[in-house]
Image: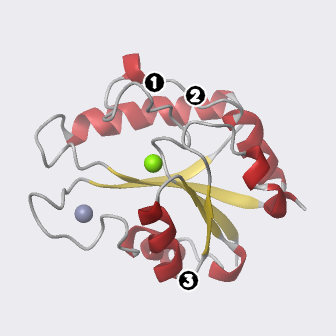
Amino acid sequence: MNKAIFLDRDGVLINNLNHYYIWNSDQLEFVEGVFENLQLLQKKGFQLFIVSNQGGISRGLYTKDDVLKLHDEVIATFRKNHIVISEILFCPHHSDKEKCLCRKPEPLMIEKLIAKHNLNPHQSAMIGDSESDMEAAARAGIQGIKILPNKNMIPFITSLLQ
Ligand SMILES: [Mg+2]
Ligand SMILES: [Zn+2]
């Protein structure tokens, strides 16, 4: 079984200081240190995944296609930096609009990836900047690591790099 890191997107990989919702490439700014840090995690044998709440879709601010297009660009930029993102899952729902089983703090996105990619939850972790990320991790039975939003995550991930 493989070990994995589940990454929240906004505030962890992409800087969301200036934009609460991010859906086009003009808004794409990576958080400091992200490429180096993901390279280090990869070298430690972790497969990398992104799990993201995109409630702006449900609220009509942007479309699923906008998100898919942006994610193509995110994946391409990571690839240029020698980082492989195995899969990205996002929840298009918003709790103001409807109920769903995928929006974090629901653990479903993480659980799906664990099952599909045959991942070992005991060796895997979720890196996020919000309580809902931590709750989703706990409910999926994996370790949760809370970092400061839009800051270099390195001080928080040293235990994963030993
Ligand atoms: Mg976030
Ligand atoms: Zn959902």
Q: Is residue 130 above or below residue 16?
A: below
Estimate how packed mark 3 is, as few (under 14), some (14 to 19) or many (20 or more) residues with alpha carbons within 10 Å: some
Residue at 73% from the left image edge and 54% from the top image edge: 156
* N-terminal-most mark, 1 or 3: 1
Separation of residues labelled 2 and 1 (CA atoms): 11 Å
The residue indicated by pointer 2 is: 77
- Labels 2 & 3 near each other (Cβ < 8 A): no
The residue indicated by pointer 1 is: 28
Question: How many marks do you count on the picture?
Answer: 3
Q: Check the image and name the residue furthest to the right.
A: 162
- Labels 2 & 1 near each other (Cβ < 8 A): yes
102 horizontally vs 93: left or right: right
Separation of residues labelled 1 and 3 (CA atoms): 31 Å
The three-letter amino acid code for the residue at tag 1 is Leu
Residue at 40% from the left image edge and 24% from the top image edge: 18
Pinpoint residue 92: horizontal percent, then vertical percent.
23, 53
Q: Nearest the camera: 105 or 60?
A: 105
139 horizontally vs 35: left or right: left
**Which of the two marks, 2 or 1, is nearer to us in this view?**
1
79 horizontally vs 75: left or right: right
Estimate how packed mark 1 is, as few (under 14), some (14 to 19) or many (20 or more) residues with alpha carbons within 10 Å: some
The three-letter amino acid code for the residue at tag 2 is Thr
Q: Nearest the camera: 96 or 114?
A: 96
Pinpoint residue 109: horizontal percent, then vertical percent.
40, 68
